[in-house]
Image (cartoon, coloured by chain):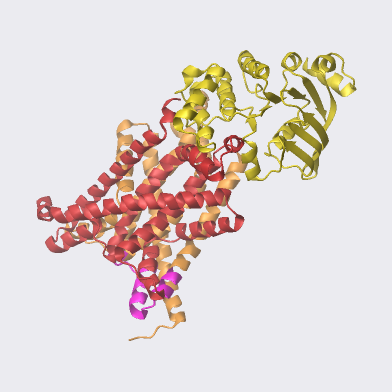
Chain colours: A orange, B red, C yellow
Amino acid sequence: MIEFSNLDIIRNLLFATQWTILLSLAAFIGGTSVALALTAMRLTGNSAMNMVVRVYVEIFQGTPLLMQMFICFFGLSILGYEISAWSAAILSLTFFTSAFLVEIWRGCIDTLPKGQWEASRCLGLGFLQTLRHIILPQAIRVATAPTVGFSVQVIKGTALASIIGFVELTKVGTMLNNATFEPFKVFSLVAIIYFLLCYPLSWYSKVLEKKFNVSR
Amino acid sequence: MLYFSDLLPYSDLFFSGLMTTVELTILTTFLGIALGTSCATIKQYGHHLAKRLVTTYVELIRNTPFIVQLFFIFFGLPSIGFKLSPWEASVIALTINLGAYSTEIIRAGLNNIGKGQIEAAKVLGLNFRQMLVHVIFIPAFEKIYPALTSQCVIVMLGSAVISQISVEDLTYAANLVQSRNFRAFESYFVTAFLYLGLSVLLRFAFNLLGKRLFAFREAR
Amino acid sequence: MSLVDLHQVHKYYGDFHVLKGIDLSINAGEVISIIGKSGSGKSTLLRCINGLEAYQKGGIVVDGNEVTSEDVQVRRLALSVGMIFQNFNLFPHKTVGENVMLAPTIVLKKSKAEAEKIARNMLEKVGLAEKFDNYPDTLSGGQQQRVAIARALAMSPKVLLCDEITSALDPELVGEVLKVLETLAEEGITLILVTHEMNFAREVGNRVVFMHQGKVWEEGDPKVLLTNPQTDELKQFLGAVL
């Protein structure tokens, strides 16, 4: 059996942290892209499109992320679509992230006074012009803080990828636990690393929120 | 091709898993909200050292994944002398998790109660506990009820992870079934819909309770 | 001995000296109107009398009890001092009846039936018996303030403090609240009001206290004081409000 020194444990965990970060970034980028598309669908005001978005949100917010991952990973491969743990994780995290972001952003857009749309119409701006010059700049200001805040949920969500065998921080944690039989130490360290990743974002989100509330 | 009928022989397994998840959800929703209410009260009205302690707890939980919390409690704590069954570890982990999130939410509700309400309670002679129970809690919860409901749904869905320490919940059943009949897609798909049903049901239960608790709202 | 006795009361908010040595003594059955500009310290004075605000020097004695601002003290005082606020502060989640019954049941430990009897009596007195089962939000401002009066009366206080209780009301609703106060005054309850209602002070009050810059500037019989002010400050104040 290989002996693991504390330094070895930390080195292994930090190495795995890179994958957690990478997966988080990929999921966040994927999630925001899809959420943007869904938000655009909602803003068209077309009731069918609206319905699609609502069902999407309902499904992905109403089912466990773990189940979405299982379906993407085990389910699809059995149906004949071979898919890696990495892709399955990104795919399911994208669903998860976008479903929450589109709702968060909806809240932000809804807080903008209705008068903004009407005033822009009166000035003769078209739908896209209104969106681009009037609504989006304001909405982005409101949405930044909660979006940064939600990125913390994405990072934490990536921990579930360990269950489908993707080797990231949590997975390496369980592997090290099996090798060292020192669960208290190993999982404490894992928790600390996640905390160091997440806390700055939580903190920054709060700062942004305060700044925004003051400027209002 | 999909073969959902292959799941039928295992419906008992699904049902018992479902019941476990329901039981756990009811228990930890109560415990978690109770914990969150206590911590929020401390954070709003308590001594500043106690406030610090609560803030640390809340930030620690909110900034680490639930699965790591669960593993820490189930694998880590026994190594320093706290032996826990998977069920106990899950109840504790879920309660602590919901407790932390609901602390923040309920605190926002307490913050929303006007100073006038508190003074009115004082000049009528209510002590602190009576004031909380009779004057503050109900209107405070009314304000944040939707956010609290969503959080409880999120924690319920998050409970799928406890299958990893072999609590025989709904997800555990899904894993077991697909390992026997090799119908992974069908098994997980059906399970996902059962969870969706639970989300809807939990929201419905909250709404029903809300209608009773906040009857005064209808009068407006 | 007087019911409420203030002796050289000083109060500071940080560096700001709000009350600069207030002496005031009020006998049972008196109706005292405290008038003055905003910032003169009149509301603060009222809130010191029932311990909602702490004071730093001097002494306040109510019904033989020294007032400090410990929470326990506020609770004990609640048995002899009632208070009504500018913004009513009814509990929105409780019906009118429940609002009035709350303190008698949980503070005075009266039975539910007994508390309900008291509540119905008090609501009768303020003319709102039929609103027993309504929620406060469905009532007008004047009605809500009358419920607040009933709620305070249900604790059978010896003194009732009224902190600008008609200021948040629409003008046409002021009368109904003042009429209730007048009835109470006739029944002999001790009233201390911070108010802008000069007519009420003149017709119903026994004494007017004019506060200026944290001091009792002038006090005396309302009919004399309000028609024949001695100081320039009171003249100016009356000129502005009348």
Q: Is residue B204 visible?
A: yes
Q: Quadrant of the N terminus of chain A?
A: bottom left
- Please give left or right for residue A211 compared with residue A150 in the image: right
Q: Position of residue C74 (x, y in %)?
A: 64, 40
Q: What residue sits 48% from the left and 51% below the top?
A: B38
- Please give left or right for residue A78 compared with residue A205 in the image: left
- Please give left or right for residue C160 compared with residue A93 in the image: right
Depicted B144 relative to depicted A77: above or below: above
Q: What residue sits 67% from the left and 16% below the top?
A: C186
Q: What residue sits 14% from the left and 61% below the top?
A: B182
Q: Foreground: C161 or C26?
A: C26
In the image, residue B173 lies in the stretch drawn in magenta: no
Q: Which residues are magenta?
A: A163-190
- Please give left or right for residue C75 compared with residue B41 in the image: right
| Quadrant hosting residue C70 | top right
Q: Foreground: B40 or A61?
A: B40
Q: Position of residue B179 (x, y in %)?
A: 16, 63
Q: Position of residue A74 (x, y in %)?
A: 22, 60
Q: Is residue A126 visible?
A: no
Q: Count all numbered tags in the image, as a single digit.
A: 0
